[in-house]
Amino acid sequence: MRFISLEQYFDSVRQNRLYFYILFLLLPWFVPLIGYLMWGNAYFTDLGIFAGGSFINLILCLMANQVNQLTAKFIAGIYPGIDQTAYRVTLWFMVYSVVNVIILYLVLSVYDFIDLFSYKLDMLHLKWSVITIVGVSLIASGLSELAYTFMQWKTNQNELKEMEQRQLQSELELVKQQVNPHFLFNCLNALSVLISEAPLTAEKFVDEMSQVYRYLLTVNGQDWETNLVSLEAELRFIRSYIYLLDIRFEEGINIKIHTADLCQNGQMAPLTLQILIDNAIRHNIVSAEHPLHISIKTTATGQLEIKNNLQKRAVRMPMTSAGLSTIISRYKLLFNQAGTIQVKEDEESFTVLLPLIYT
């Protein structure tokens, strides 16, 4: 069997911190114990025997541990199930005991043959060494099961996290491919009326509409899910979007923007404001008799607050993938805990607090 270099060995151990901790918790007492069983009191009284014997035994223990790890992987491959713990632990204990006792006997025979530090093979010391090895093998089998169970749990958590991210990305991909057909249809209807009744307004309307769709094409690139824009850029877009809504709803909607200059460089997910405004329109009455008031402002803590008065429709609209739930999922994907969105609702208003990321 070909053994890897010490540097590669320690790299492989560090890949699993639990194995690393187990190994270096056991070795500091196991190596001196084996040394004492081999050389007796001379091990602690003779500096040469203590230093040289400890070093050689440490190297041999690391090599034996490498063999044990390969064995552990092989046995785990045979009995990988969570319900097969008893089989794994029993087989690990048996194999560890047999392999380590054989290694111990061969090593002690070599020590005796070369007369290493005047070592002589003694059956009484050999018996106690074997008992020690068997006891350590029992502990090692239990710790191996602990490490295996932990790694299985960690793997399952990683797979679950990857599945959640893939699901979020799939939902966001649907939004990316979605151009609101109702909004476009309403804009074209409004434009057709303006062309005949207010040509100058129609020209302005076309300019603002082109600004809106130019922005949509810009941010809906290949990396749409992970793109960020500044608050300043998002506000430039949303002002054009608000103009289209003002033409469409006239006195039925009133959107005010009050943001601090210091927050203009804060980063956010593009189209967030449009989705939140559409969400407010979708779920509330919008009419000249009952105008919808929406405010967009920054807070003292550097967040972005989007607030609207509540005047819910008699027929509740279902939450679609393009609504608030998508924004929450998107910010979770982009910023994890740093992107936590706060939603507040009372009898009079509905408020969403968005984090602004400053880099």
Image (cartoon, rainbow, N blue to C red):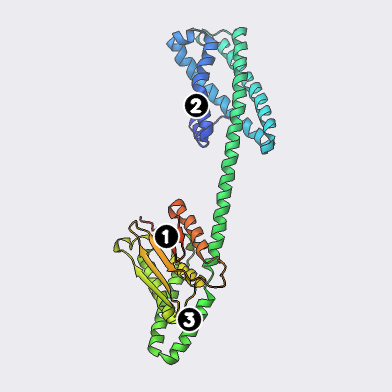
Q: Where is residue 218? Give x, y as percent.
A: 44, 69
| Foreground tag (1 vs 2) | 1
Residue type highlighted by circle 1: Leu
Residue 228 lies, in percent from the top left, at: 42, 61
- Number of the front mark, 1 or 3: 1
Q: Secondary structure at mark 2?
A: helix
- Classify residue 89 by image quadrant: top right
Q: Secondary structure at mark 3?
A: helix
Pointer 2 residue: 24
Give amino acid for label 3: Cys
| Residue toward you, 24 or 301 | 301
Q: Secondary structure at mark 1?
A: strand
The residue type indicated by label 2 comes to: Phe
For the residue pair 71 and 270, the one nearer the viewer reads as 270
- The mark that comes first in sequence, 1 or 3, is 3
The answer to whether residue 209 is seen in the rendering is no
Which quadrant would residue 107 be assigned to in this image? top right
Q: Residue at x 44, y 8 (%)?
A: 45
Disc 1/disc 2 C-alpha distance (Å): 48 Å
Residue that carries the numbered disc 1 in the rendered image: 353
Mark 1–mark 3 Cα distance, whole angstroms, equals: 29 Å
**Which residue appears farthest toward the left when viewing the image?**
261
Dot in front, 3 or 2:
3
Residue on which disc 3 sits: 187
First reached walking from the N terminus: tag 3 or tag 2: 2
Label 3 – label 2 distance at C-alpha: 70 Å
